[in-house]
Image: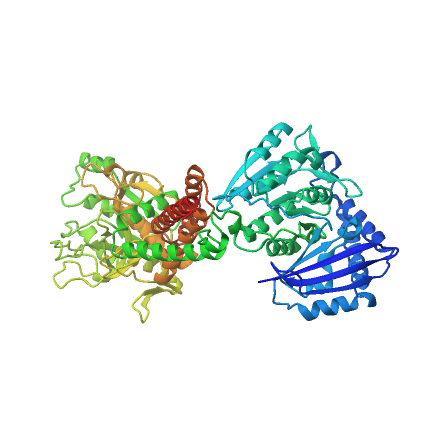
Amino acid sequence: MGKLVVLKFGEGSFEQGFAVTLQIGEEHERAATEITGKLPSFPEMPLYYSHWQSSYRQIGNRYRLHADKMQVTNVSMIQDCENTSRILRARFNTWLRAEEFRHLREKWLERLSSEEEVRVILQTENSQLQLLPWHLWELLERYPKAEIALSSPSYDRIHKPRPKNPLVNILAIVGNSQGIDTEADQALLQQCGNAEVCFLVEPQRKELTEHLWGKNWDILFFAGHSSSKKNGESGRIYLNKTDSLTIGELKYALKKAIENGLQLAIFNSCDGLGLARELADLQIPQIIVMREPIPDQVAKEFLKYFLQGFAGGESLYQAVRQARERLQGLEDRFPCATWLPMICQNPAQIPPTWDELRSTTKPKDTPNLVLSTKRRLATTLLSSLAITGLVFGVRCVGWLESVEIPAFDQMMRSRPAEPQDSRLLVIAIDDDDLAIQRQNGESLIGASISEKSLNKVLAKLNKYQPRAIGLDIYRDFQAKQPDLITRLQKTQNLVGVCKGSDSTANITGIKPAPEIPPTNLGFSDFIHDSDGVIRRHLLFMNQEPTSLCPATFAFSLQLASLYLRPSGIQPKFTPEGNLQLGKTIFPNLKSRTGGYHDIDANGGQILLNYRSPKQIVQQVKLTQFLASPINPSAIKDRIVLIGVTARGDSPDTWPTPYGAPLDEQMPGVLVQAHMISQILSAVQDGRPLLRVWSLWAEVAWIWVWSLVGGVLAWRKFSLPWLVLAVSITSGVLYIVCLGLLISGAWVPFIPPILSLVATVSLLSIYNSATKVQVENGQ
């Protein structure tokens, strides 16, 4: 239980001094200690405050004063305000350390512990005393759980029992908002848990009066423009662009609201001391106002922090102190922001907690069904952990692979296209080339290029000195033309293809061209997934004993190695069995990689990081190459691939992430070009290889988005807004995953989406069930 401290100021003035009575006791009990003393005269004190007040108001920081009185921000006055505030603070504390007041200080220190929560009530009729920055009293600052409130010496207890509301009923008046942003205040109130908020936006006087009479309100809130007279005896609120009211003009409606249980009035507007004085005469239990004009940004931040604390389980006084002190982060732009919020208290009333405002039985008998901040956090953490475990378990057994892989393909298609790789040239054999060869009487038995045309191509290429030539055409038979046989045998930079056998799939393989030396052979085998799509790149493998293909390195790797050889780069293997070219290591895939659940990871496999769905290398048709003059720079020191792009006769096309239907499939020679480009770009350009995160990093990633879902459910949006929030969040997640994929990381997308939606759904159901329990008084 906390302590209650009352400082009563008797008759007096700053010219004569003040008689002071200090009372200290337990909350809910009569004071156990009472001592009297005096504060000496200090005529200059009001002048110090006036100097600070003048410098503060000259800043003109977009205040919530009447719109006509707002000024243009003048940052040059900030330093002057800070200087006068330091002077005021120093003089104020010097006065409170007077010898006549010392025994009250000592009694305070004797009776109060710095660990206790302390409510301090300052009772005085003197408006100049009320304006002083009592929160800066160095004695009060020793007590981190103490907060001070103002009170009039005259007060009455409200004896009528307060009606019990299942939810905290808030009447929120949004007055004239010209030049300020009150939508933020509305949004913060809407996010309060276990509350029902009624908004009156720029109401007419009659509308406001009827609402005050018509319901049992717990909290009255006002945001907009307001002001007080210079003597602080009365205040005025601006309802709309044409109408304004004093508290006296709402006297009967407010008295009725107080009789019906109104506990707290919050005026998140300027210069509220006059409003507080009039409300105190009506015996309202608690009031929060701003002592001076308040900048719009400060008003919004105070309300946010106060509602977080108060609705989260903090006492009213602690919520105000914490919210007030957190405003210090704004004082570089808004000096003395922490000075502004003030509590005005009816000493006969005990401030209720947020839970007590909405209790359906006596507070001690009511189960705590309100989700406090700590309880919400615990519920969110436990729910997110459970859902993360469930989603990851489902993923581990492979049930998400069928949706994760298409999502990966979609992101591959969404990436921006990369420029062509100038290190490669493709001599493409299309349907027209096949027809022209036949028209010329050239034999195509067993191949897509005749021996005559192939001999011409190789002869022409050798003139221009390509660094490597890749013949991506099966020739499992002996050549007949002597010139071609000799050329195939002696072209040292020519790499041919063969296909390995696979006994598990009953594939016998294809022999290499007998003229090409075994050291210049590469296998052309592609690794495709269960849907036939090529997403992986096989770099090397151990051939089966019965394989017709002796090559252990891929066709793409052989050509890339030839290209890199002049740079002194040779293939080698790390102790872990990963391929290394120069400083670049190609880590082998594991059976569980990214969205894959249980793939055959034999051999050296990596993910295929396609370059672009468009033409990634320069292409020239076979007929054009043979008939037209060639620019030597288009061939010299490049890798030249010879392969088939025809679709009508002996097609060699493959499904890729860019298209699986037959008319969208990619020719095999272009798939090889992607693979070669991937190797060269990784080694020479630092282009990222596709990689995945570790198991625990993926678990943490899924959990983070589950927590995001918990936060969305915590906000308690209406269903349409919740759906919109989840949709926007999902879009953000997609963009993040796409950005990471562009940078080379394949991170989970579907599992986080599932955990996000599942957590939102579960906690929304839980919130609804809790609300029903509260409404039923269970």
Residue 175 visible from this viewpoint: no
Total labels drawn: 0
Relative image position of residue 81 (x, y in whole percent): 78, 52
Relative image position of residue 699 (x, y in whole percent): 36, 59
Q: Quadrant of the N terminus?
A: bottom right
Q: Residue at x 57, y 40 (%)?
A: 260
Quarter of image, res 630:
top left
User: Left of 336 or right of it: where is 597?
Assistant: left
Instruction: Looking at the picture, tell me which residue is in the foreground, 125 or 713.
Output: 125
Quarter of image, res 378:
bottom left
Instruction: Looking at the picture, tell me which residue is in the foreground, 185 or 506.
Output: 185
Residue 124 visible from this viewpoint: yes
Q: Which residue is at the far front?
A: 159
Relative image position of residue 420 (x, y in whole percent): 40, 46
Quarter of image, res 582:
bottom left
Instruction: Looking at the picture, tell me which residue is in the foreground, 237 or 102.
Output: 102
User: Left of 327 or right of it: where is 562?
Assistant: left
Coloring scheme used: rainbow
User: Left of 737 or right of it: where is 666?
Assistant: left
Relative image position of residue 181 (x, y in whole percent): 62, 39
